[in-house]
Image (cartoon, rainbow, N blue to C red):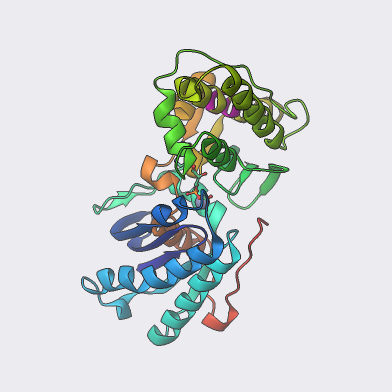
Amino acid sequence: MFILGIETTCDETGIALIEAKEDKVRVLKNELRSQYKIHREYGGVVPILAAREHKKNLPILLENIKKYFDLRKIDFLAFSVGPGLLPALVSGKEFVQDLAKKLNKKIIPVDHLMAHFYSVLIKDKNKWQKVKEINFPLLVLIVSGGHTNLYLFKNWQDKKKLGKTLDDAAGEILDKCARYLGLPYPGGPEIERLSIKAKNYFPLPKPMLQQGYNFSFSGLKTAFIDLVDEIKKYKKIDEEIPNLCFSLQKTIFEILIYKLKKATENFKVQNIAISGGVAANQTLRKMVKKNFPNYRIYFPERKLSTDNGLNIAFGGYLLFKNGTLPLNYQEIDVYPRSI
Ligand code: KG4
Ligand code: ZN
């Protein structure tokens, strides 16, 4: 069967086409347009501009797919209904509803965060591939610009949210602190790039480390800003930027790993999946592998860590295979917050 997946939750516009048969999939097209250059000017994502850009980009991406494939052959559409930025979600919803109506097809709503998780099971390649098997019980950590959520999956059906961030998300802290250093948006990849040149480590606080599985990063952000201001008093900040970047990402990753470790011990889990934009970070990947040597660790391909249409198309297929029925276009709604 053929599935067209559409992603518009934040600042990436994505449409992908996959073919799927039992436990095999192949990626026919994975079209993506990033809007970071537009939001860069404002230091972060401006929701209303994201909506405008999705509206502009979606028909262009669809046209690229149409050149190659007759859309009447698709079996259903998959659409990322949330969580995400409301104006961005609404512009995607209008597009997908209109398309479903024109093609006379139904839609499977896909949760954006679960799609991040599913992305660990596939690769972005044109050849037929077997969907990776996953071992349970499993801890799933989603670290993105909008979320830091930790889940325990006993199996595919039995999922429990153990914790979430009570304030900023991990990626959001990287973006905000990068901005304070005068680095461009998105901050995560910039911080990763500059950290390589670091020589020293500045200790930073790890708020709420001992309190359950929730996260809190806003105190760390304040401490980071105070540290930057302090350094600026006696020297040029440029010299310390690599050290500051290195210290910030190391502290965030240590917090994530600490909570993961606690959860693996408490729930006797040997399998961990980590996904979302921040999971693209190579240092995080290395630190996780080092801290969990005898565990089965699932990361997505680096380019599938951040938002894209393929995760959604594949998510739609997994849901369908597990009994989810596609909906009429009128039944589709979006939700900005994580559920
Ligand atoms: O999943 P995603 O594309 O969008 C949301 O769902 O939020 O994640 C975007 C976030 C941004 O905060 C960005 O700075 C961060 O992921 N990010 C990274 C890296 N690449 C993207 N953070 C750390 N290292 C990276 N290489
Ligand atoms: Zn995301």
Q: Nearer the viewer, residue 135 or 40?
A: 40
Q: Residue at x 50, y 68 (%)?
A: 51
Q: Is residue 212 left or right of residue 92?
A: right
In the rendered structure, the answer to whether residue 58 lies left or right of residue 325 reads left
Is the C terminus in the top left, top right, bottom left or bottom right quadrant?
Answer: bottom right
* Residue 251 covered by magenta stretch: yes
Range of residues picked out in magenta? 249-253
Q: Residue furthest right?
A: 211
The location of residue 84, given as percent across then percent down, is: 58, 59
Count of all numbered marks drawn on residues in the image = 0
Q: Residue at x 57, y 75 (%)?
A: 332
Give whichever of 30, 268 is nearer the camera: 30
Closest to the observer: 322 or 303? 303
Q: State left or right for residue 55 relative to residue 338.
A: left
Residue 135 in view: no
Q: In this orientation, which residue lies closer to the viewer: 106 or 256?
A: 256
- Give the image location of residue 277, x and y in percent: 48, 44
Q: Residue at x 69, y 23 (%)?
A: 205
Q: Give the x, y percent position of residue 156.
A: 58, 50
Q: Quadrant of residue 102?
A: bottom left
How would you classify the magenta stretch by its main secondary structure? helix
**Residue projecting furthest to the left:** 68
Q: Considering the image in quadrants, where does the N terminus appear?
A: bottom left
Query: Residue visible at 45% across and 13% down?
Result: 199
- Residue 138, by quadrant, is top right
Q: Is residue 96 above or below residue 102?
A: above
Q: Position of residue 148 (x, y in %)?
A: 62, 42
Q: Can I make out residue 142 in this image?
A: yes
Q: Single out the residue that lies furthest toward the top.
A: 200
